[in-house]
Image: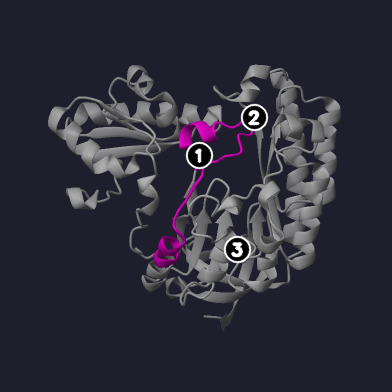
Amino acid sequence: MEKSGYESCDDVRKADLIIINTCSIREKAAQKVYSQLGRLKQLKRKNHRLILGVGGCLAQQWGSQFIERVPFLDLVFGTHNIHLLPELVAKVEKSRAPVVRIEFQESVKSLNIPVPNNNGRVSAYITIMQGCNNFCSYCVVPYVRGREESRPFRDIVDEARSLAYSGIKDITLLGQNVNSYGLGNGGGHDFADLLQEIEHISGIERIRFTTSHPKDLSDKLIRCFSRTGKLCEHIHLPVQAGSDRILTMMNRCYTINDYCEKVDTLRAVCPEISITSDIIVGFPGETDRDFQATIDMMKKIRFDNIFSFNYSERKRTDAAKLGDTVNASVKRERLQTVQSLQEEHTLEKHKALVGNMEEILVEGPSKNSRDDMTGRTRTNKIVNFRGDYELIGKVVHVRITCAYLHSLRGELTGEEVT
């Protein structure tokens, strides 16, 4: 939008253009959009020039229904139309009438919109693909983001090099399923090839990625954790459930034994690797026995952390045809059980790090204290420690002194790595 004369604004009350990016993966995320729009309604009354737009998956899913539900909206644009944003905003400016664009394009042109130049940041995201071909029965992503499309290999590498030149040191490669990168238009390169190519870019010190589908986690990719020095020792590998029966109903295309074998291989190749996951409780038809299988699986694997959710029925998905058959109170109880167990495992993992020396890439001041700096270990754990602003962007040695559920506390040793 800079080419259209816009610049970013830190105070929403002074903005002339507000875009809300939405998610439709769970009902709670959709509800948050209504709350946010309700708060912004007052700004529209005070500033008649204000253009209020909604993008992302919920915009794609609802389209013109969004305008019907929220009549003061000016713009709704879908996941394949981000590149048209300047044109759509200009149309609203001229006509002051609502504009809706949610059609799928032959290719996702916004994939090649580069990340803005570094503005004091040390980390950045690079989108390497969009869409999904898996059609998990509970998931609306293929319907709102389309089929998989991989971004050209060289474009990704060039953007990573440009970010490194601007001072970025930590990049995260993004996709609905990065493990299947290259099946579209990767030019004969797979995801492991991409990791190994970015490894050679001077200035990039850490490489991360998300998200991975277990069925597509290849041995070649697993070996990157021992052969690619800049690849951080962390993988987010959503398991979703511990029952093979439920996994089949979810159309996940692997068994718990398959999943556990991949975890064992990851830990054999990279013993220090941190493994996080997603778990859904209360999927239609989930019995007490199915749920116990999830608990047993968690106790066996002992994840570093998880994102856990109650099943949320999404329209157009196959699971929606099954009906929401698990009682809401049962769901809440099961979710609490999962979260309590994971808190034990997370705290256990964190306490095991006390006394260790960790390499921390300093990201900036801590949210809790301006006297503290914060950064992450290579295993993606947050560490806070007393330090100066001049450390931002540097990798330093920090000795872990205290372990908490959501973070670690450490002491700067004075030994700077880079």
Q: Amino acid at mark 2?
A: Ser
Query: Which residue is tagged 1?
Result: 147
2 or 3: tag closer to the N-terminus: 2
Labels 2 and 3 touching (C-beta < 8 A): no
Query: Which residue is tagged 3?
Result: 192
Which of the 4 image quadrants contains residue 223? Answer: bottom right
Q: Residues within 10 Å of mark 2 (few under 14, many from 20)?
A: some
Which of the 4 image quadrants contains residue 356? Answer: bottom right
Residue 137 numbered mark, or none: 2
Labels 3 and 1 touching (C-beta < 8 A): no
Q: Residue at x 29, y 45 (%)?
A: 11
Rendered position, 246 above or below 383:
above
Q: Amino acid at mark 1?
A: Arg
Q: Residue at x 72, y 27 (%)?
A: 282
3 or 1: tag closer to the N-terminus: 1
First to last magenta residue range: 131-159
Q: Amino acid at mark 3?
A: Ala
In the image, is residue 323 part of the stretch drawn in magenta?
A: no
Rendered position, 145 above or below 391:
above
| Left or right: residue 240 compared with residue 288 | left
Colour pattern? one colour
2 or 1: tag closer to the N-terminus: 2
Distance from the alpha carbon under mark 2 to that under mark 3: 28 Å
Q: Residues within 10 Å of mark 1 (few under 14, many from 20)?
A: some
| Residue 1 pos. (x, y %) | 25, 48
Rendered position, 51 above or below 327:
below
Rendered position, 289 above or below 82:
above
Q: Residue at x 45, y 34 (%)?
A: 57
- Please name which of the two marks, 2 or 1, marks the residue nearer to the observer: 1
| Residue 121 pos. (x, y %) | 41, 64
